Image: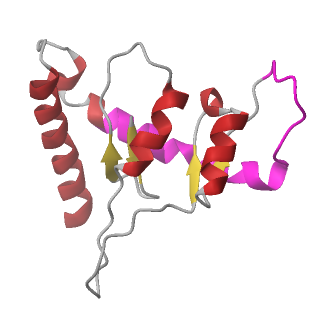
Amino acid sequence: MVVVDGQGVPLGKQLYSASPNEVRLAEETLASVRVSRQHRGGRPRQRVRRVIADRAYDSDPLRAQLAERGIELIAPHRWNRSKPRTQDGRALRRYRRRWKIERTFAWLGNYRRLVVRYDRSITIYEAFFHIACFMITLRRVLK
């Protein structure tokens, strides 16, 4: 799982096998975000204001956990949701910006070593993932 900013630059990540549910991994992934402050020193920012996620993250316990931390979850509602909707159309308008997140996944897919998994070790895969994120960040900074 990858957390990106509004321009598609990776900020945090957590790598897992394909079996765990993404909703259970969302808290750990958001905890990996560290954004340094440009003009002043101090501790890096860790809390994001809002998270734009896909339909799989529509979960009331996840919304409650993020609301405790002051984070707004923007995710479309599942079609089989039994409880009433928690968001109206105003909050879901931000979901239109999700293409920037999907674009980052496409950029990561450009690195063949990440797509075709030759490695059985997660540490080697993680090293190549870091290199790909570094290349994406460097490309965005130099633009």
Q: Is residue 87 left or right of residue 123?
A: right
Residue 127 visible in the current orientation: yes
Q: Which residues are magenta?
A: 79-107
Does the segment drawn in magenta span residue 84? yes
Q: Position of residue 5 (x, y in %)?
A: 42, 57
Q: Position of residue 27 (x, y in %)?
A: 48, 42
**Could you tell me which residue is drawn at 80 percent across and 56 percent down?**
90
Extreme-right residue of the structure: 84
Residue 74 visible in the current orientation: no
Q: In the rendered view, tell whether residue 6 sits above or below residue 20.
A: below
Does the segment drawn in magenta span residue 65? no
Q: Position of residue 55 (x, y in %)?
A: 65, 30
**Could you tell me which residue is drawn at 80 percent across and 21 percent down?**
79
Q: Position of residue 129 (x, y in %)?
A: 19, 35
When asked about the image quadrant of residue 124, the answer is top left
Name the quadrant of the C terminus.
bottom left
**Could you tell me which residue is drawn at 45 percent across and 32 percent down?**
25
Closer to the camera, 52 or 84?
A: 84
Q: In the rendered view, tell whether residue 37 sits above or below residue 142.
A: below
When asked about the image quadrant of residue 75, the answer is top right
When asked about the image quadrant of residue 59, the answer is top right
**Could you tell me which residue is drawn at 38 percent across and 15 percent down?**
18
